[in-house]
């Protein structure tokens, strides 16, 4: 760590005036539909080689639209410019650091993109006969084995297509597990720091949420857990390290208590990036783990998909896994193993989605794990934790230490949570104002206002792919922003100044969202 | 409302709710501190008129740009009126938490429960210690 505090000189301080709008701010964002001009075309097709027929002669009338679909009619350069223009209005990982806590926005190696784009991967048809897709099945089978090793559990299903989908699978497996034993259990224990998807999944799966309190060190309050573990408990869902970025030192005792009471143990793998190659959910006593391939294993994300949330499970849960399972059989004739889908699992909870999953995600994750290897995966987690601790140490000094102290004085893992409570009291600026001003400094803001138990929370996850210089720059920007707030808090309250759109009306966006193009007719 | 305020004529519940008691009925709402902690309120789901609510139990939910939060009943009784204006314009809770931003009017089943609530001075002391 350098001795000199990082400072932002006046020459690089971004503007804090709204008087002269940038060209992007002057130009209203338009949709592709608004660019449409009747009968304009991007391509001219040659005459058909067969006789043309009226659509109504080919397709039964009840399937035909009453009027044509309102598709945009634009030229090819307009299409290219349109998408290029809106991509430049975006802030993404290829633009700058993106320390969004709990989301693991790390760089996705280009090697994996290249492999995923190979025609044999990218152009594979989802309905291809498994006999003609042996390589794809082999890749899925191998990825399952990699994830088993990382999770420390003996079986994997790649079916769930998101973290939340993996959670739902986990609770359906839990229900099937208890039903097989003739038991009906209604409660699921969840710490009050949990990701919002956990209670949502519990409710959706028909269970009742029972919240666990957090102790003064940021872990599960053990007395609260002991008082709530009973024969009604179906499952405990937990993230470790949790959303405060803290590894719960009591994890073995926690899982032991619930197991003894007959419940299953669910590990939310959202924070797996902190522990890969160092500790394994299976060894901590968990039965079911979901892995966010789009977080820890290099699938680009942030745009809503596609993702993948495979689940790894223990022996006692395996019989209930979704179908189809990917299976390998030795041929015994020197021709090498054959791969196939197996649907014959009588206790299975069934299918969770159509086809076999987002195959491109599997390719990227397989390529990521195979190219890093065991030591590389371990190193990635170590660097993620080191980067977080380095940044936290830098932010514990000076203005950040005064106005944005760490919420818990415990060793951070891959992320940490600061409290903007003092900044609000002493400077009159909220965490949201600091986050908005960070955009002007070229950083995507960290997660704000989560977890809820921290006042004015700011949750920072730098990831392993940021350099020390980049971490220094982030610490310097936060210091410069707090300096601005000391001089005039209004500077922050009106930020951002340089983004394509300025401060948004979040209440109106939530209350009266415009989510579709108004119809032109 | 930009400045914190805690009117003297209200009774306060530690979960940051207030009650304005008028004989057998009372209006309920959330305090300046609660709306400030929540941030902009974007949704209010009023309880059914006629429903029974119990002191210290949630009787409705408000959603802000940060989170969905339960609103705790400061006293028990039957809901006789809800504030339709807040359901339509939830930001009233932020603009005027003790006036236009009231949430429900309740016919109290046990007015003596109010003895367990705080006055403004005690509530301000609670906030100072949080």
Image (tube, grey):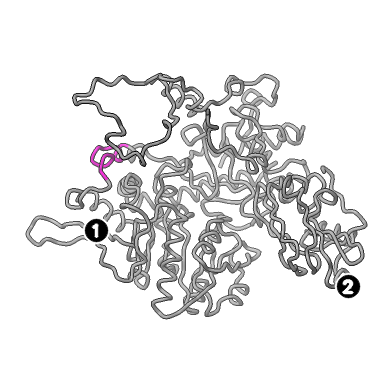
Q: Chain of mark 1?
A: A
- In front: A257, or A36? A36
Which residues make up the magenta segment?
A114-125
From the viewer's perspective, is residue B44 above or below residue A173? Answer: above
Q: Residue at x 84, y 51 (%)?
A: B98
> Do residues under tags 1 and 2 come within 8 Å of each other at their CB atoms?
no
Secondary structure state at the residue bearing disc 1? strand
Which numbered circle lies on residue B112? 2
Is-magenta flag for residue A290? Answer: no
Q: What residue occupies the far left of the structure in this picture?
A: A333
- In front: A108, or B21? B21
Quarter-of-image position of residue A245: bottom right
- In front: B102, or A94? B102
Q: Residue at x 59, y 75 (%)?
A: A228
Total count of labels: 2
Q: Residue at x 51, y 28 (%)?
A: A31
User: Mark 1 against mark 2, which lies toward the viewer?
Assistant: 2
Place of residue A9 in the rendered image (x, y in percent of width and height, measured from the top left): 64, 27
Q: Chain of mark 2?
A: B
Q: Residues within 10 Å of mark 1 (few under 14, many from 20)?
A: some
Which numbered circle lies on residue A512? none
Q: Is residue B31 left or right of residue A157?
A: right
Place of residue A438 in the rendered image (x, y in percent of width and height, measured from the top left): 62, 35
Which residue is labeled 1 in the image? A341
Secondary structure state at the residue bearing disc 2? helix
Please identify the quadrant where the N terminus of chain A is shown: top right
Place of residue A411 in the rendered image (x, y in percent of width and height, measured from the top left): 57, 56
Q: Is residue B99 left or right of residue A421?
A: right
Place of residue A120 in the rendered image (x, y in percent of width and height, measured from the top left): 23, 41
Q: Residues within 10 Å of mark 2 (few under 14, many from 20)?
A: few
């Amino acid at each position: 760590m350098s001795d000199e505090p990082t400072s932002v000189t006046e020459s690089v301080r971004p503007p804090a005036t709204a008087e002269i709008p940038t060209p992007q701010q002057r130009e209203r964002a338009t949709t592709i539909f608004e660019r449409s001009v009747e009968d304009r075309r991007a391509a001219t097709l040659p005459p058909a080689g067969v006789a043309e027929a009226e659509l109504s002669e080919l397709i039964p009338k009840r399937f035909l639209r009453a009027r044509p679909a309102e598709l945009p009619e634009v030229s090819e350069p307009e299409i290219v410019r349109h998408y290029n223009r809106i991509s430049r209005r975006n802030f993404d990982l290829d633009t700058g650091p993106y320390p969004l806590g709990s989301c693991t926005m790390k760089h996705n190696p280009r090697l994996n993109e290249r492999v995923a784009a190979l025609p044999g991967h990218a152009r594979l048809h989802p309905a291809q006969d498994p006999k003609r897709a042996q390589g794809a099945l082999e890749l899925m089978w191998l990825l399952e084995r990699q994830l088993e090793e990382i999770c420390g559990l003996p079986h994997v299903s790649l079916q769930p297509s998101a973290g939340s989908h993996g959670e739902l699978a986990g609770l359906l497996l839990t229900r099937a597990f208890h039903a097989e034993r003739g038991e009906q259990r209604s409660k699921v224990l969840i710490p009050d720091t949990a990701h919002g998807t956990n209670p949502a999944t519990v409710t959706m799966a028909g269970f009742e949420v029972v919240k666990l309190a957090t102790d003064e060190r940021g872990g599960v309050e053990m007395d609260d857990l002991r008082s709530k573990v009973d024969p009604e408990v179906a499952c405990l869902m937990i993230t470790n390290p949790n959303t405060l970025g803290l590894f719960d030192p009591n994890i073995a005792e926690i899982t032991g208590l619930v197991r003894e009471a007959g419940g299953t143990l669910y590990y939310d793998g959202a924070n797996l990036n902190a522990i890969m190659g160092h500790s394994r959910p299976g060894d901590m006593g968990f039965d079911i783990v979901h892995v966010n391939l789009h977080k820890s294993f290099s699938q680009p994300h942030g745009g809503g998909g596609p993702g993948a949330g495979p689940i790894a499970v223990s022996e006692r849960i395996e019989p209930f896994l979704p179908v189809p399972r990917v299976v390998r059989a030795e041929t015994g004739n020197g021709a090498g193993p054959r791969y196939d889908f197996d649907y014959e699992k009588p206790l299975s909870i069934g299918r969770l989605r159509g086809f076999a999953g987002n195959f491109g995600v599997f390719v990227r994750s397989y390529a990521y794990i195979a190219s890093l290897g065991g030591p590389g995966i371990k190193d990635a987690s170590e660097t993620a934790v080191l980067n977080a601790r380095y940044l936290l140490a830098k932010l514990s000094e000076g203005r950040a230490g005064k106005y944005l102290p760490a919420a818990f004085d415990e060793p951070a893992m891959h992320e940490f949570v600061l409290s903007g409570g003092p900044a609000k009291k002493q400077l009159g600026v909220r965490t949201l104002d600091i986050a908005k001003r960070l955009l002007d400094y070229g950083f995507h803001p960290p997660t704000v206002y989560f977890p809820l138990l921290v006042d004015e929370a700011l949750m920072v996850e730098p990831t392993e792919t940021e350099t020390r210089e980049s971490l220094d720059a982030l610490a310097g920007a936060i210091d410069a922003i707090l300096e601005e707030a000391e001089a005039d808090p209004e500077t922050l309250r009106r930020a951002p100044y340089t983004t394509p759109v300025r401060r948004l009306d979040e209440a109106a966006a939530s209350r009266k969202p415009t989510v579709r193009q108004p119809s032109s007719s | 409302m930009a400045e914190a305020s805690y009117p003297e004529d209200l009774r306060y519940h530690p979960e940051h709710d207030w009650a304005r008691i008028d004989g057998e009925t009372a209006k309920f709402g959330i305090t300046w501190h609660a709306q400030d902690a929540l941030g902009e309120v974007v949704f209010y789901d009023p309880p059914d008129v006629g429903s029974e609510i119990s002191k210290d139990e949630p009787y409705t939910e408000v959603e802000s740009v940060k989170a969905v939060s339960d609103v705790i009943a400061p006293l028990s009784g039957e809901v006789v009126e809800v504030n339709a204006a807040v359901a339509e314009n939830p930001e009233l809770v932020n603009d005027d938490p003790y006036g236009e931003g009231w949430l429900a009017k309740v016919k109290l089943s046990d007015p003596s429960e109010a003895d367990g609530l705080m006055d403004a001075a005690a509530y301000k002391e609670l906030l100072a210690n949080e």
